[in-house]
Amino acid sequence: MKRTIVLALLLALTATLCAQRGKVQVNRHGEIVAGNQVIAHIEKVGCKLLSADCQFFITDENDNLLIAVNTLSFRDNSLVIPNQPNSGTVNYYVFAFKGFESTAEIEITGVPKEETIAEIITRWRLIKGKRLDPDAVKLFVSAYGTRFSDKEIRQSLKGYVIK
């Protein structure tokens, strides 16, 4: 019985330590901290209370830009509900990476925050050794693509006939 209790406590302690090690934080200095190590800095610009218009700049320790994240929105006609003025609005992040031509778009759930951007960056391991990981960036871009801006373009072209 004692052995079972000790084993259960040991497993709980191990799980707690592993969960804390994987936790991502943005400290008051704007540093993205993952696993007790600073991996980059993040700066938020232009964000107002309850506004989706934000920009985030992720830099290395020498203040070299690595990633720029912009928030955009569009009205998705397929999501519009009659007599609901704000229905159909889709807010999304646009990730642009230094040295890469492609961008990636992710839907925003909630209010844009530095912590959300930091979690995405660390979950996808976009920064390795305080530099962009080209393989991770390519995988991220291919996984997310530009589905929101593509849909917005398709909606705006609807009804036009090109001869």
Image (spheres, grey):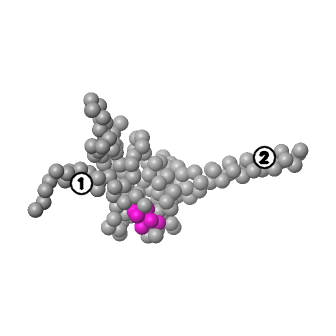
- Is 149 in front, or is 25? 149
Magenta span covers which residues?
136-142
Comparing labels 1 and 2, the label whose residue is closer to the camera: 1
Circle 1 residue: 153
Q: Which quarter of the image is occupied by the N terminus?
A: top right
Mark 2: few/some/many CA within 10 Å (<14, 14-19, 20+): few
Q: Is residue 13 magenta?
A: no
What is the number of callouts on the image? 2
Give left or right: position of 110 versus 83. Answer: right
Residue 9 numbered mark, or none: 2
Res. 143 in view: yes
Residue 129 numbered mark, or none: none
Residue 36 image position (x, y, % from top left): 59, 55
Kindly report the distance in space between the C-alpha atoms of the residues bearing marks 1 and 2. Answer: 56 Å
Q: Which type of secondary structure does the marked residue at label 2 adopt? A: helix
Type of amino acid under label 2: Leu
- Is 156 in front, or is 45? 156
Residue 3 image position (x, y, % from top left): 87, 49
Indicate the quadrant where residue 140 lies.
Answer: bottom left
Which residue shows up at 49% across the image and 49% down it? 26
Mark closest to the chain's N terminus, 1 or 2: 2
Q: Which quarter of the image is occupied by the C terminus?
A: bottom left
Q: Is residue 141 magenta?
A: yes
- Is 145 in front, or is 159? 159
Give left or right: position of 124 versus 23. Answer: left
Q: Which type of secondary structure does the marked residue at label 1 adopt? A: helix
Judged by its main secondary structure, the magenta piece is: helix
Hey, which residue is sitting farthest left in the picture? 163
